Image: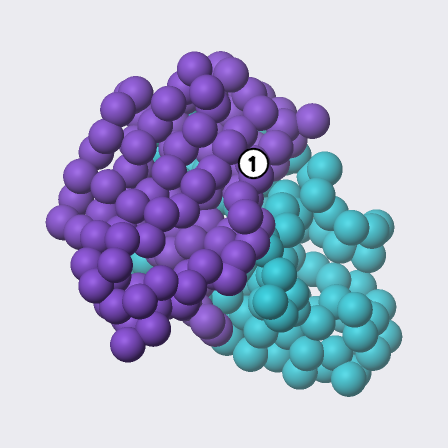
Chain colours: A purple, B cyan
Amino acid sequence: QKEVEQNSGPLSVPEGAIASLNCTYSDRGSQSFFWYRQYSGKSPELIMSIYSNGDKEDGRFTAQLNKASQYVSLLIRDSQPSDSATYLCAVNMGPYGGSQGNLIFGKGTKLSVKP
Amino acid sequence: GAGVSQSPSNKVTEKGKDVELRCDPISGHTALYWYRQSLGQGLEFLIYFQGNSAPDKSGLPSDRFSAERTGGSVSTLTIQRTQQEDSAVYLCASSLQQKNSPLHFGNGTRLTVT
């Protein structure tokens, strides 16, 4: 069973703090990893993608990937109330492998940034 | 360019009626996915189309659910004899064929079965 696990939260951080969101996955052969943000009542939107071990930075967002530990994380620096949303981790578990086509989604972590 | 388009945006139907939900993917995207999301819940995979390959229907919850993708573009999700537990937001997403390609989601169809 190919799985992506996330802590459901809610994760509450004060404004200006660093929010750390974590995700583990079951398939060691996974190739690509994505973070989606979903505001309440809206569709998911892609905010970060990462394919290689290490860190990838985009503005206030940093994605971290450790394939040996099968772990991917998202750091949000200088968190703002507008970052309050559910963050979904998605993992591509092989070209056309597994169920659900290419991509397996976690259930999401709800982030709340308090002013 | 245009994103993934879904229609209708909202649908209210009576229990027992059939409904059709439409998805128009981004031009050139060969992969198309349908997901269901109940209030406060995660994404529930329903079905996946990739090019001309047989669709992956492993997520369809019952035989009342079916989907087609005609001409490799527009897809229709049909729910027959709707039940109240079918009430949810139905999300369509598309992507390029490449394995590293992310999904682009439509705005969803909110289905309410009364």
Q: Residue at x 56, y 36 (%)?
A: A4
Coordinates of residue A101 in the picture (x, y in percent): 56, 33
Q: Residue at x 44, y 29 (%)?
A: A71
Q: Quadrant of the C terminus of chain B?
A: bottom right
Residue B69 sits above or below residue B108 on the image: above
Residue that label 1 marks? A4
Q: Identify which residue, A112 or A82, lies in the foreground.
A: A112
Q: Residue at x 78, y 50 (%)?
A: B61
Coordinates of residue A85 in the picture (x, y in percent): 40, 64
Q: Is residue B104 visible?
A: no
Q: Quadrant of the N terminus of chain B?
A: bottom left
Residue B5 sits above or below residue A103 on the image: below
Q: Residue at x 29, y 21 (%)?
A: A52
Coordinates of residue A96 in the picture (x, y in percent): 53, 23
Amino acid identity at mark 1: Val
Residue A82 sits above or below residue A71 on the image: below
Task: Identify the element where label 1 is drawn.
Answer: strand
Q: Identify which residue, B77 or A111, lies in the foreground.
A: A111
| Count of marks overlaid on the render | 1
Coordinates of residue A114 in the picture (x, y in percent): 34, 73
Task: Locate residue B75 relative to residue A14 in the image: left or right.
Answer: right
